[in-house]
Image: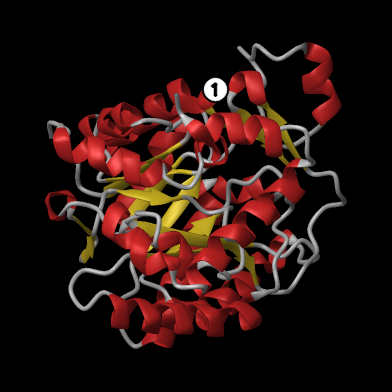
Amino acid sequence: MRVYPTFFRLAFSWMDAERAHKIGFLGIRLANRCGAGRVLQRFTAPSAALRTEAFGLTFPSPFGLAAGFDKEGHGIEALTDLGFGHIEVGTITGQAQPGNPAPRLFRLIEDRAVINRMGFNNDGAAAVAPRLRSARAALQRRYPGVRPVIGVNIGKSKVVELEDAVEDYLISARSLAPAADYLVVNVSSPNTPGLRLLQDVSTLRPLLAAVGEAADNAAGRHVPLLVKIAPDLSDEDIDDVARLALDLKLDGIIATNTTIARAGLVSSPEQIEACGAGGLSGAPLRKRSLEVLARLKAATGGAITLVSVGGVETAQDVRDRLEAGATLVQGYTAFLYEGPFWAAKINRELAKRPARR
């Protein structure tokens, strides 16, 4: 019998989802502070056979934690204790903001899914930057060989108008790029009004070009730049983004963010309606996320790094993404349902039966 699902049902399933997240995350960080992380590493460290090269970096494992769990860089070291090959921090905005009013995070347990309308709640780029620098230095000391990678996901501040979005992204890029191993431009969250309009290639082109230049100048080196897209784009729009990424020589595309769709859920219509607006993540995204990955693979011909996220729960899900053309795979929602040893379990199973690429 697996212990954590029982623990989740008894301890967390009845609790407000955001409160449960904060308590669980605090527990992970406390374990690190009291020295348990060093012990954990002996059991959770990925096999050397899983090391993966992507955009000039070496990842201890192809499996990492997607943006959204550690929004402000408070627990990077603690999360690497659990076996993730990379931690993507964020989404971080140029200005500090509280996000949308609570309640804003909801579970659909029968669907192994989550609906959120968090709204990029974070302390702002200036406050997060020193945490990233500290975490990166700590990881370099702890892992003298191949260390876990730190990605940084940036988005638009809610109070900033769309016509001023580029300069707002540049504030984040200049502050955060020096401490980031790679940078992600998030234009695909459904919870910031108008943000997804930035996925139009005519708007996306100048944004990505400006962020890439600012990041490299601030860091004094090339900072790999990726863009994160929504699963709700049409196939034609996906092709357009792929062509743009190749034209701008981006380092990668992350697919996909949460969806505004609600089709195919087994939870009752009343329960879904009670959650309200927001982005859906978790198991229901599996099919569409794979479809977008396949579309991107065909459109780019393997000339760009693809990072697959959405509906990833098991080692087989990770294998499926790697075999479909992804170089890296991320998860998040299943972490809430599977518990702290989820990444280590996936890594063990991947090492036993690697993906065929």
Q: Nearer the viewer, residue 320 or 174?
A: 320
Q: Position of residue 98 (x, y in %)?
A: 80, 64
Q: Is residue 333 left or right of residue 244?
A: right
Which quadrant is home to the N terminus? top left
Q: Nearer the viewer, residue 350 or 254?
A: 350
Residue indicated by mark 1: 284
Q: Position of residue 177 (x, y in %)?
A: 45, 77
Measured along the vertical axis of the image, is residue 209 above or below residue 288?
below
Residue located 74% across and 53% down the image = 119
Measured along the vertical axis of the image, is residue 353 above or below residue 111?
below
Measured along the vertical axis of the image, is residue 25 above or below residue 127?
above
Which quadrant is home to the C terminus? top left
Element at label 1: helix
Residue located 28% across and 27% down the image = 320
Residue located 66% across and 65% down the image = 165
How would you rate the neighbour count of disc 1 (Cα within 10 Å): few for under 14, some for 14-19, many for 20 or more?
Answer: many
Q: Is residue 311 left or right of residue 91?
A: left
Q: Is residue 129 left or right of residue 208?
A: right
Q: Position of residue 349 (x, y in %)?
A: 24, 35
Residue located 44% across and 66% down the image = 36
Task: Tell me the kind of residue under disc 1.
Answer: Pro
Q: Position of residue 223 (x, y in %)?
A: 35, 73
Q: Is residue 235 left or right of residue 337?
A: left
